Image (cartoon, rainbow, N blue to C red):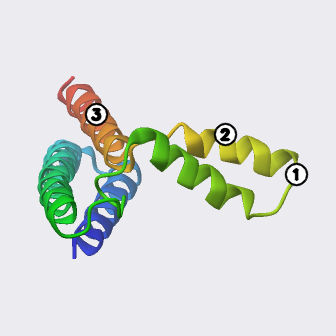
Amino acid sequence: MAALKLLLIIVLSTATAAGFFSLKDHKYGLPLAVFGFVVGLLWVAVNLGSKFWQARWEHRLRLVEEQLRPKMDLFSASWETIQEDVQQGLKSRKRGLIHRGYSRLVLLKPSVTLMMTLLSALFVGFWGVLVGLTLR
C-alpha cells in the first residue's frame, strides 16, 4: 500500500511539473508551483511516516525473534553477520568488473528511506524556488 501511495505522489509531482513547464498563460504558474510544493511536503511526510512504522516493526520483530528463536539472526543479527550474509549473497552472482563495482556500492548499504526522503526534500526545494520565481 505504501508503494502505491509513493507511486501516486511521484506521478502527481511529475504531472504537476509537466503542467507548470508547458504553461502558456502564466497566471496559473503560482497555483501550480504552490500545489507542487505542497505535494512535495506530503511526499516528505509519507517517507518519514513510513520510516517510523518500519523502525517500530523491525524493533518488535527483533524482540520476538530474540525470545522465540535466538541465533536465527534475521532482525537481531550483528552488523558483521549482516555484512557477511550480503557478501555471500553477492558472490553467488555473475562476475566481472561492473558486478564488482556494483557489489561494493551495495555493501555501502545506502538507506532506501533516506534516499527517498532526500529526493522528496529536493522536490520541495525545487518547487520552493519555482514559487519564488513565479512571485517575481
Residue topped by disc 2: 104
| Above or below, comparing residue 64 to residue 51 in the picture | below
Crowding around mark 2 (Cα neighbors within 10 Å: few <14, some 14 to 19, many 20+) is few
The residue shown at (34%, 66%) is: 11
Instruction: Check contact, mark 3 vs mark 1: CB within 8 A.
Output: no
Say the numbered circle drawn on residue 130. 3
Residue 5: horizontal and vertical position, in percent? Answer: 22, 69
Residue 40: horizontal and vertical position, in percent? Answer: 22, 47
Earlier sequence position, callout 3 versus callout 2: 2
Using residue 63 as the reference point, say whether residue 94 is left or right of it: right
Q: CA distance from mark 2 to mark 1?
A: 12 Å
Three-letter amino acid code at the position of disc 1: Gly
The residue shown at (68%, 47%) is: 103
Q: In the rendered image, which quarter contains the C terminus? A: top left
Earlier sequence position, callout 3 versus callout 1: 1
The residue shown at (81%, 63%) is: 94
Say the numbered circle drawn on residue 96. 1
Indicate the secondary structure of the residue bearing disc 2: helix
